[in-house]
Image (cartoon, rainbow, N blue to C red):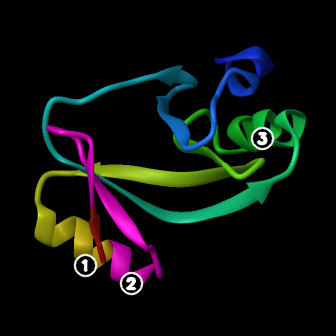
Amino acid sequence: MINIRSIQKLKDNDGLTLKKGKPIHYKSGWQVAVSGIECHTAREAINAVKAYGGNCGVWFSNSIYYIDQSYRVSTKHEALTIGREHNQISVLKWSNMSLVYC
């Protein structure tokens, strides 16, 4: 499981995806969130990561940590469908780390 220092090291508009508490990167597919919370401290963020069992995305922007329960899916269509169903702004394309807006 990552520790609080890993959370504190995130710079503005930086993030990571975790699987079983460890950072993970994929070469293909799409990442889409289905639920999440906002945290205002690194301690709150690490507690949220633990509450999700270490299977989540972490994004830091404007001094707020966004912790999302997210999943990797194979197709853009599937990612956008899930994203729209869960009122997400965008989904992540792993091959080039770009965002596609829902």
Cα separation, mark 1 vs mark 2, equals: 6 Å
Q: Amino acid at mark 3?
A: Ala
Q: Which residue is mark 3?
A: 45
Q: Which residue is mark 2?
A: 85
Few, some or many residues within 10 Å of mark 1 (<14, 14–19, 20+) = few
Q: Which residue is mark 1?
A: 81
Circle 1 SS class: helix
Is the residue under label 2 in contact with that under label 1 (CB below 8 Å)? Answer: yes
Quadrant in the rendering for residue 44: top right
Q: Amino acid at mark 2?
A: Glu
Quadrant in the rendering for residue 6: top right
Q: Is residue 16 in the magenta section?
A: no
Cα separation, mark 3 vs mark 2, equals: 25 Å
Q: What quarter of the picture does the C terminus occupy?
A: bottom left
Circle 3 SS class: helix
Q: Which residues are magenta?
A: 83-99
User: Which residue is found at the position 58% from the left and 45% from the top?
Assistant: 59
User: Which residue is found at the position 54% from the left and 37% from the top?
Assistant: 14
Q: Is residue 35 above or below residue 19?
A: below
Give the x, y percent position of residue 61.
65, 50
Q: What quarter of the picture does the N terminus occupy?
A: top right
User: Which residue is found at the position 52% from the left and 43% from the top?
Assistant: 57
Give the x, y percent position of residue 46.
77, 33
Q: Out of 4 and 11, give the one closest to the viewer.
A: 11
Q: Is residue 84 in the magenta section?
A: yes
